[in-house]
Amino acid sequence: MKTEEPDFTDPRELRKQAEKILQQKKEKALQDEKNEADARKLLHELQVHQVELEMQNEELLNAYEAAEAALKKYTLVFDQAPMGFVTLESDGTIAELNFAAAEMLGDRRFSLMGSNFKLYISDESKTVFSDFFKKAYATQQKEACEILLGDGKRSAHQIYLEGIVIENDNKCMLSLVDLTNFQNKGI
């Protein structure tokens, strides 16, 4: 099978072929322009998205810095508070405590973590504390009691406790106020 070659000596055929080639060039140019416009539009969208991401990143950094500042403030307030704060697991194990609570319990803070709070309560107050602790979990409301802290190695301290169950009923947050100094001063 033989393909016919166009006859470029015939002016009509020559014009027809020229128009065909010109049309193909126009279509290719239009396609190139469309591709270039699509590329410019895509580049613009990517640049806008990049600016959005940069703005979000800046906002996240600001939020992180604010969270860090709040954490420092919270830690300072918690650690340096004049009253004791203790967080207990449901079995009475000390999860967290501040320096004032550690001083009331008579040991270093990190030595106390993981030990059972009941070990530091005098024998005559263990029942009072157990009832208070059970009631705090049962009622899910703030409860209060007075106990004696002291394990025989050091003098007992009269302590006012308030507690409330936190963190989806898993932990009990206690505040401890040493009443011994108030009683000694006649307040």
Image: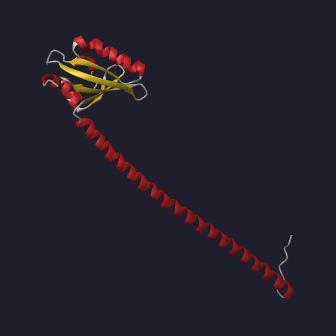
Residue at 21% from the left image edge and 33% from the top image edge: 82
Q: Is residue 50 left or right of residue 125?
A: right
Q: Nearer the viewer, residue 143 or 117?
A: 143
Q: Nearer the viewer, residue 12 or 112?
A: 112
Query: Please, which residue is most extreme toward the front here?
Result: 187
Point out residue 89 in the picture as x, y percentages from the top left corner: 35, 23
In the rendered view, would you say 92 is above or below 17? Answer: above
Residue at 70% from the left image edge and 74% from the top image edge: 30
Image quarter of the N terminus: bottom right
Q: Quadrant of residue 71?
A: top left
* Scheme of colours in the image: secondary structure
Q: Quadrant of residue 83?
A: top left
In the rendered view, would you say 157 is above or below 15? Answer: above
Q: Is residue 108 left or right of residue 78?
A: left
Point out residue 67 in the picture as x, y percentages from the top left corner: 36, 46
Residue at 20% from the left image edge and 24% from the top image edge: 179
Point out residue 116 in the picture as x, y percentages from the top left corner: 28, 20
Tell me how many marks there are: 0
Q: Is residue 48 visible?
A: yes
Point out residue 135 in the picture as x, y percentages from the top left corner: 37, 17
Q: Is residue 10 visible?
A: no
Image quarter of the C terminus: top left
In the rendered view, would you say 4 is above or below 102? Answer: below
Residue at 64% from the left image edge and 68% from the top image edge: 35
